[in-house]
Amino acid sequence: MLMDISLIKKQADNELALIEKAEDLVLFEKKYLGKQGLIADVFKGLKDLPENERKIAGNQANLLKNELKAVFEQKSKQIYQKRGQTENLVGKIDVSRPVPQKEIGYLHLITQAQRELTDIFKTMGFEVVLGSEIESDWYNFDALNVPKDHPARDMQDTFWLKPESSKMLLRTHTSPMQARYMETHKPPFRIVVPGRVFRNEATDVKHEAQFYQLEGLMVDENISVSSFKAIMAEFLSQYFESKVEVRLRPGYFPFVEPGFEIDAKTKGGGPARRSPKGEGGWLELMGAGMVHPNVFKAAGLQQRTKGKVNFTGFAFGCGIERLAMIKHNIPDLRLFYQNDLRFLKQF
Ligand code: DAH
């Protein structure tokens, strides 16, 4: 028995000298000092020894146990000091100690708003599609019934890309995706297109050279202005979390006929909060209308459906920041782009 004890000691010393990692130290503790470890085995074996030997072996086993505990503690301190930590395996971990705070990033308000808006449309069966920020003048204008030299081109001051002969530009709205989508799909369809657009405009509280829009397009048999109004009322009520009434006023956009400006009001909260006319007033929200036959034509929809499908559609386009400004009472569009954490952290 005494032989066993000194062998265990030698073996433990050798192993401990080689240990560098905390994980190995845990295994070491288990092997020697654990409930079913080697020292425990020695104690279990004591009862089979004659009385006189039992006493001596018991003493030796106790000594070994205490010695191993001491070297284990020392080693664990060494390892943890190396790691720059103050706890060791033996001293209990202080769970009440504050954990160093980690800064975790989160989504910018524009992205949050964009996702909220598209999620609402998804529940109404709309597909979310994306276009590209660099567009040709065909898709940005011509295909949307804005011919070259038409005064309507001036409604949107455009960043043209060089060389000018390329006729490429930074899209001034998300509407080009109407034409692109209709070129490759047959009705019925309903889509929304979120994305960044660019205008060569001076910056002020309501204008930035870049901002985000959400475009919508729904084409099917028997789509009427009342279908559009119902979808708008549902969409706005969900986004502003209160019942929203929708009003249409005549408005001019070359790609729709008739075209509307959409106003909205709520009983409390929502758009009414920032209405210039005060509580309960109407607030202008977006442009919309029934898709112009020339837009269907430019996308080749009639030819592809061979006139067999009798379809109509509506389209709308709204500013994403504008909706978020109204919802959250944000006074200045430029705040979205200044990266001021005091602003961003509020959302
Ligand atoms: N594209 C227009 C703009 O940026 C907004 C718009 C108006 C989109 C009417 C539409 C629409 O789809 O039908 O000013």
Image (cartoon, helix red, strand yellow):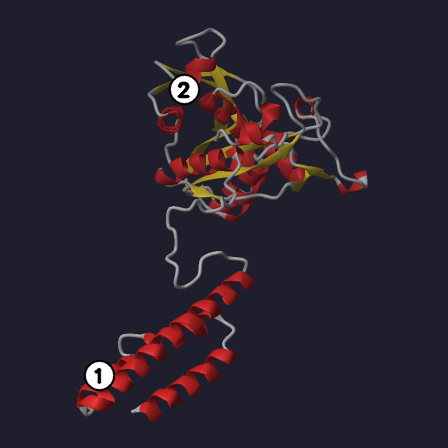
Q: Quadrant of ligand 1?
A: top right
Q: Which is more toward the observer, 136 or 172?
A: 172
Secondary element type, mark 1: helix
The image quadrant where one finds the N terminus is bottom left
The image position of residue 121, as x and y in percent, is: 40, 36
The answer to whether one can see residue 144 in this image is yes
Kind of residue at disc 1: Lys
Kind of residue at disc 2: Gly
Q: Which residue is mark 2?
A: 270
What number of labels is visible? 2
- The residue under the point 64% across, 41% down is 133
Q: Which mark is residue 44?
A: 1
Instruction: Give the mark, 2 or 1, whose residue is nearer the N terminus.
Output: 1
Q: Which is more toward the observer, 314 or 40?
A: 40
Q: Which mark is residue 115?
A: none
User: Within 8 Å of ligand 1, the CB of disc 1?
Assistant: no
Secondary element type, mark 2: helix
Asked if residue 99 is positioned above or below residue 61 in the image, the reply reads above
